Amino acid sequence: MKVLVTGATGLVGKAIVEILTEKGIAVNYLSTRKKKITTTENCQGFYWNPSKGEIDLECFEDVSAIINLAGASIATRWSATNKKRIMDSRVQSIRTLHGAMKKIDASSIDTFVSASAIGIYPNSVSNFYDEETAEVDDSFLGDVVKKWEKEISTFEDFGLNVSKIRIGIVLSGLGGALPKMAGPIRNFVGSIFGSGAQWQSWIHITDLAQMFVYVVENSLKGTFNGVAPNPVTHAKMTKELARVLERPLILPNIPKFVMQLLLGEMAYLLFASQRVSSKRIEKKGFQFQYPNIGPALEQIYEPNSGNGESKIESLDKKFV
């Protein structure tokens, strides 16, 4: 088996590549930086530029599955320019891959798995969402995910097993949301946003990476929520993180309007509430290593864990 991975240099991409290579599965990856492309025995890089629709067609050679993780970070101020970048990076990446597959013999490829996001679910402190939910959140992020998933579905044109993994808050010591949450707490200025009642559906990065590989290996179809079985409120998440870091939470809760002044529309990410179910992927046989928030945080920040850096940092040599 050989898997083509887009977004392989990102936080989740590196974790997925690590698992694939440990399993002896060869990896082709796509990069927008020609000078940074490297090749090892089981990991080969190829150039693409989705903004221009450019891609090296050799990247598909002997590939049986594609994992798509391409997309600009949403954790940046939502200016008109950044909104366009966030949307285009997702839509154009999918269209570039789709257009390329029309030009090749794609008979060896049977599976297409793409990242998506739980931001498609409406903001609610009372609802519990699963993949059958038809409503879409009335927000910029909801609009992005709706259009993103529409593009992903076009790969059904090729008769592939097409899956979408709607990712929640990814917990990793190497990047993403968690270090940004942990920083203020470590420095004794941590606090809860708003009432803290907003639900946060999270997942340990190891479980998320394993989920992508599981979907590929089992040729699963459809939509799956990339979240742990036990979502928690923002207050619970913050208190558990403070416990693990052995720091007190002494400051009062931060009102919503304060963060809106600081971050603009992007502050929505801090207060949106999505309580999301992982039952569908579990019914397919997937087992979580970290179903509960406490042990997940303890694994990341335990003294001898190195925050997972020892394994994943070595992958940087392939991508930088």
Image (tube, rainbow, N blue to C red):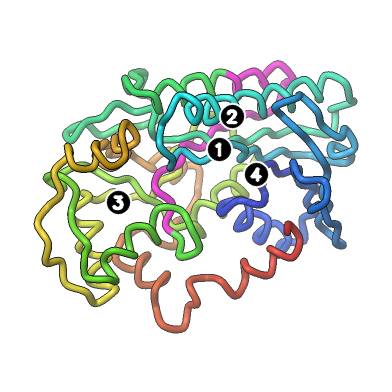
Query: What's the CA distance linking mark 3 and mark 2?
Result: 29 Å
**Which residue sits at x=25%, y=57%?**
237
Query: What's the CA distance linking mark 1 and mark 2?
Result: 7 Å
Regarding mark 3 in the picture, which secondary structure is present there? Answer: loop
Query: Would you call the spot at circle 2 few (<14 residues within 10 Å), some (14-19), or many (20 or more)?
Result: many
Residue 276 part of the magenta segment? no
Q: Which mark is residue 90?
A: 2
Which marked residue is nearer to the observer: mark 4 or mark 3?
Answer: 4
Residue at image mark 1: 72
Q: Which residues are magenta?
A: 151-171
Query: Would you call the spot at circle 3 few (<14 residues within 10 Å), some (14-19), or many (20 or more)?
Result: some
Which marked residue is nearer to the observer: mark 3 or mark 1?
Answer: 1
Q: Are marks 1 and 2 in contact (CB under 8 Å)?
A: yes
Q: Amino acid at mark 4?
A: Gly
Query: What's the CA distance linking mark 2 and mark 4?
Result: 11 Å
Of callouts 1 and 2, the N-terminal one = 1
Of callouts 3 and 1, the N-terminal one = 1
Q: Are marks 2 and 4 in contact (CB under 8 Å)?
A: no
Residue 160 part of the magenta segment? yes
Residue at image mark 4: 7
The residue closer to the viewer here, 149 or 160, is 149
